Amino acid sequence: MAEITLLDGGMGQELIRRAGDAPHPLWATRVMLDHPGLVQAIHADFLTAGASVATANTYAIHHDRLAPFGEDHRFADLHAAALDEAHAACDAHHAATGQRARIAGATGPLGASYRPELFPDHTAAVALYAEVAEILAPRCDLVLAETVASLANARAFVDGAAPAARAAGIPLWIAVTVEDTDGTRLRSGEPLAALAEVAGDVGAILANCSAPEAMDQAMPHLAALGRPFGAYANGFRQITSDFLKDKPTVDALSARPEMTPARYADYALGWVAQGARIIGGCCEVGPAHIAEIARRLREAGHRIV
């Protein structure tokens, strides 16, 4: 049987659900100011469910997200707050169980999620990713680019983040978002095979924040890149046109009611059967989903690492 890295689930939707605040374009970031400790509690629940990685709540901490709302002066402080809450949860989990989880320093796409046409030019993007990685790398076990929608995004992340990762002695991981109806292509329309250009410089290549059915299609194409691979899907009905407008809020998206923990675990175990060794969940995948995956992995004889 295999050793499986079990990622956590979606932080943003859990924060909205538990905080009870009205959706806001800075929803996951704003919560750390308005509800300190809530991120730590969600990390703790995912770790208790069986996750072996805590993904820091740093996805949306970019200048282009913060500046329009007058929050750019908090850039460094918000990263520190998110990392503090991840470390606190992991330390408490280790003290209680003896199991030490890894921390993934996450960074989302520049410009906007799912909109590769808004990605900045290479030189600007490299500098922005370098700034983020210099904050994340010293306090994390890996730096993870999430929801990468184009080859330009992947290339800029690697070029920008690699120096800080090398200095810290940690790997870079890339998680790409694929078309919901064609899991063989990035949302830019480029084939997954194009990621071969950056594959040699990253420790793992994953697919994230797309429909579970698309992940099924993506697995053999990711496997062909010759790196550890896997997937963590979302539980949305679809990425709507309203969410692709400027400064979107999550109320433009709706969850799939049929995506129960058992149903999602069926997909996740299917990715393992295709060779995936890193699995988890993205938006609308909660602690109950991760707990079911953990249970099923152990039942099948796999070891969570």
Image (cartoon, rainbow, N blue to C red):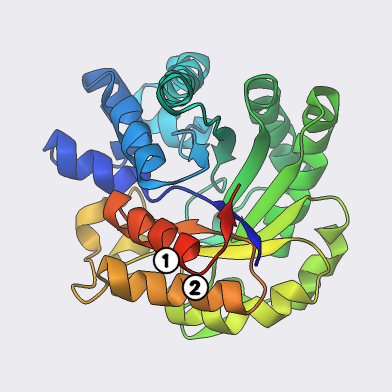
Left/right placement of residue 15 relative to residue 90 reads left
Left/right placement of residue 26 relative to residue 296 reads left
Query: Which residue bears the numbered disc 2?
Result: 269
- Where residue 241 sits, quadrant-wise, is bottom left
Tell me if mark 1 has few (under 14), some (14-19) or many (20+) residues whose alpha carbon lies within 10 angstroms of its own.
some
Where residue 118 appears, as percent x and y from the top left, is 55, 55
Query: Which residue bears the numbered disc 1?
Result: 296
Kind of element beneath mark 1: helix
Left/right placement of residue 155 relative to residue 102 reads right
Residue 39: mark: none
Tell me if mark 2 has few (under 14), some (14-19) or many (20+) residues whose alpha carbon lies within 10 angstroms of its own.
some
Above/below status of 94 relative to 239:
above
Where residue 8 appears, as percent x and y from the top left, is 44, 47
Residue at figure coordinates x 66%, y 38% from the top left:
143
Above/below status of 215 relative to 48:
below
- Where residue 189 sits, quadrant-wise, is bottom right
Where residue 207 appears, as percent x and y from the top left, is 58, 65
Three-letter code for the amino acid on which mark 2 is drawn? Leu
Kind of element beneath mark 2: helix
Residue at figure coordinates x 50%, y 69% from the top left:
300
Above/below status of 158 relative to 66:
below
Q: Which quarter of the rendered picture does the N terminus lie within?
A: bottom right
Above/below status of 42 relative to 92:
below
Residues at marks 1 and 2 touching, judged by CB atoms closer than 8 Å: yes
